Image: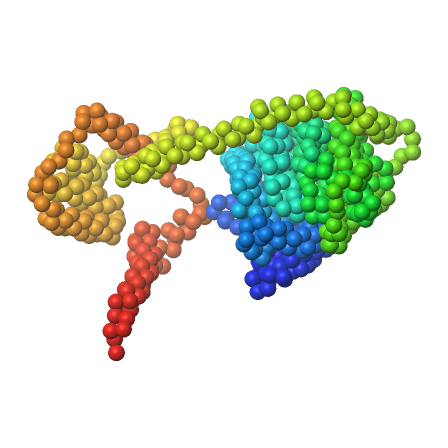
Amino acid sequence: MLAVVAAPVAALSGSLRPGLAAPVGAGIAGLAAVATLVGWLSGGGAVDVAWAPSLDLRFAIELDGLAALYSLLATGIGFAVLVYSSRYLPLHLEHEREATGTSDPGVRFYFFILLFMGSMVGLAMAQDLILVFVFWDLTAIASYYLIGFDRHKEESRASALMALLVTGITAVLLLIGALVFYAAYGTFSIPELVELTEPGALVTLAGGLIAVAGLAKSAQVPFQFWLPRAMAAPTPVSAYLHSAAMVAAGVLLIGRVYPLLQKSEVLLNALLVIGLLSIAVGGIIALTRNVMKQLLAYSTISQYGYVVFMFGLGGEYGAMAASFYVIAHALSKSALFLTAGAVTEATHETEISRIGGLARRMPLLAAASGAAAAGLAALPLTIGFFKDELLFDAALERGAPFAGLALLAAVLTLAYTWRFWSGVFLGEARGHAERVPWALVAPVAVLGSLVLVGGILVEPFAALARDAGAASFDAPVEVEPAYHLEASPENLLALATYAIGALVILSRPIWIGAARAFARAGELAGPERAYNAALRGLNRFSDFIHTIEVRDLRGRVATILVPSGILVGLGILATPSGDVYRVGEVTGDDVPLVLALAAAAIATVAIIFTKKHVTLVLVLSSAGFATAVAFAFFGAPDVALVAILIETLITLLVLGTLKLIPRKVLESGARIPVRQVWRKGSVAAVAGATAFVVAWGTLSQPSAVEGGAAARLTELAPEAHANDVVTVILADFRALDTIGEVTVVALVLLGVATLLFRGRLP
C-alpha cells in the first residue's frame, strides 16, 4: 500500500511546495522497504478478491519469496536513488535551465519514479496473468516518461519512444500467451496453471510468448538495442530502471512463470541460447565503449544474460543462482551508475578517456565504487563472489561445456568492470574535478558497503534468494553458498577467471580491433537498424493512410471500416466453424415475420435502382418501417415504436431539406463510371456477406454464460418495470443520458445568452 500511494502523495506534496517531493518520496520508499522486509520475515501474506467475476479476473497478490526479493529491490534501491536524486536533480535541472532558458521544479520526476516503484511492487506480487499484464504496462508508461524526462531533447524523446515500442509491443505477446492459457484451462491464475498444465505444444507456445515479453524487457538479444539508447535519461533513472527495476522486471516475469517454462525443454534450451548470446554481445561491446553510462548499459545486457542463462540451466541451482545473481547485480550496478553520475557532475565529462586519476581527489567515492566493482567482478569478500560460485555450480550440474561457457562469461565481466573503474579512478589525472555534494556519494557508499557485508554475512541474502528460487522452481531449494578453502571445481573456475581476466586486460591492444569490428557490424546489420527501417516504413504508411483519410468523407470512413472488416474476416477464417451456423425451422407463426423481413430486404435492394430523390427517401424509410414491424414480431413493441418515431422524423427532415434544395441541383447527378460501379458493388457485396456471416454465427450461438452480467441484467429487468433489457436501456439509461445532454445544452445556452446580453441588462 505504501508503494502504491507514494507517487500521488509525493506529487501532491510537490504541488504545494516543490522541495517536499524528494524527502516525502524518499521517506515513503524507505518505509515501504521496511514494511516489505517485515512482511517477508513474518511469513508473507496474500490477498485474493474478485476483480471482474464475469471475466474470471481476480486481484490476486502474494508476498512470497520472489515478490519479496523484487519488492525489496524496487523499494530499497529506490530509496537510495531518491536520496541521490534529491541533490542530483536540482543540479541537472539547473544545467538544463541554462541550456533552454526554462524552469522545471522536477516534481514529475518523483511522481513517475515512484509510480514505477509502485507498479514494480504490484508486478512482483501479482499471481494472475491479467494483473501481471496491467502492472507490466504501468511500468512501461512510467519508464517512457522517465527516459524522456529531458523532453526538449530529440534524443530523449526518440529513446523513450524506442523503449516504449519494444517493451510495449512485446507486452501484447504476454497478453496473447495469457489468453491461450485461459482458452485451454479456463483460468489466469498462475498457481492454478502450474497444477493444471502438462508438457506439450501449448505450454511451449503460450510460455514462449510470455517469455519473449520478459526477454524484451530485460534487453536480451535481439531486443538489446533499446537499453543503450535509454541512457539518454538522467543518471538516477539509469541507476534505478536499468539496473534494479525495469530490466529486472523482465527476469521477474520469467521467474514468476518459470514453473510453466521448465515443463518445456524447448523453452529451456531457448533461454540458454539467448542468455549466452546476450552475455557475449553485451560483454564484447561493453569493452569497446568509451562513455561511462554506455559501458554500464551494455554490461547490464550481459549481466542479465547471466540470469537468463541460469534459468535455462534449470534445476534448483539454476533457480536459486538466478535470484541471487539479481540481488548481487542490483547492488553493484546501481552503485556504479550513481558513480558515473557523480563523476560527470564533478568533471563535466562522460567519456572515460577524458577522465582518470580521480581516486586521489575523490577517495570515498573511489573506495565505495571499488567495492561495487569488486562485487560485479566476483572478487572474494564481496557478495559477487557467491553469485559466480552459484553460476559455476549450476553450470557444472549440466556438464563441463556449460562450465566452460560460464568461465568465459565471468572473464568478460571482470574485463569490462576493470575498464570502467580503473579508467575513472586510476592512472594519470586528466582535467579537473569539483567537490560533489554528500548526497551523491552517500548512496554509493551504502550500496558498496552492502556488497562487502554480503561477502561476509551471506546468509540473509542467500535466504531471500532461496525463497525466491523456491517460488520459481516450485519446490524447496536447499543451496548454501559459502567459502570453501579447497580445490573444488568452483574455486578452480574462480581462480581461472582471475588469471584469464588479467590476460584479457593486459592484451587489450591485441583484440580491441576485432571487438570494435564486431560492434560496428552490429550497428550496420543489427536489430536496431531493422527497428529504424520498420519505423520509417510505418511512418510512410501512416502518411499514405492519412492522405486517403483527409481526401474526402468516404476515405475517412473507409480507413476505419476497411481495417475493421479485414480483422473480422480474419477472425471468421481463424475460428472453427463446425456446428456454428445453424438453420432453424420456419413454421406458420413465422410467416408474418418472414414477410416483414422480405419487405425490408426488397426495399433495401430497390434503393440501388431508385434515381428520384423523393422516391429514394420514401423507399429508404419503407425499409426502416419494415424493420420496425420485424421488431414488433420479435416481441419488442417498445423498440418498434422507437424505430417508427426515428424513421418518421428522419423522413420528414430529409424531405424538408430536399424542399430547400433547387430542383436543378437535385436532378443534375453525375454518372458513376462502370469501373467504379463494379468496384463499389464488389465492396458492398463482400461487406454484406461478412455482416451476414457474423450475425448468423452470433444468433446461432447465443451467450450462455451462467451467472454472467447478461443473465443478471435480465433478472433485474422486471424491477425496472420492463419485460426485456432493451426497454430498460432505452427508457432508463438512455433517458438519463439525454437528461445529461439537455443539461449541458441548457448551460451552453445560458453562457451564450450571458455573452449576448452582457451590458444590456439593467
Q: Position of residue 360 (x, y in %)?
A: 83, 45
**View extreme (front): residue:** 431
Asked whether, in this view, residue 161 is left or right of residue 701, the answer is right
Location of residue 486 with respect to 740 vertically, above or below: above
Asked whether, in this view, residue 537 is left or right of residue 23, the answer is left
Q: Position of residue 525 (x, y in %)?
A: 57, 23
Frontmost residue, 485 versus 571: 485
| Quarter assignment of residue 267 | top right
**Residue at figure coordinates x 7%, y 43% from the top left:** 663
The quarter of the rendered structure image containing the N terminus is bottom right
**View extreme (left): residue:** 663
Scheme of image coloration: rainbow
Would you say residue 178 is visible in this rendering?
no
Would you say residue 509 is visible in this rendering?
yes
Q: Position of residue 675 (x, y in %)?
A: 21, 24
* Count of numbered marks: 0
**Residue at figure coordinates x 20%, y 27% from the top left:** 677
**Residue at figure coordinates x 81%, y 26% from the top left:** 506
Asked whether, in this view, residue 348 is left or right of residue 418, the answer is left
**Residue at figure coordinates x 60%, y 61% from the top left:** 18
The quarter of the rendered structure image containing the C terminus is bottom left
Asked whether, in this view, residue 383 is left or right of residue 537, the answer is right
Q: Position of residue 518 (x, y in %)?
A: 66, 23
**View extreme (right): residue:** 485
| Quarter assignment of residue 376 | top right
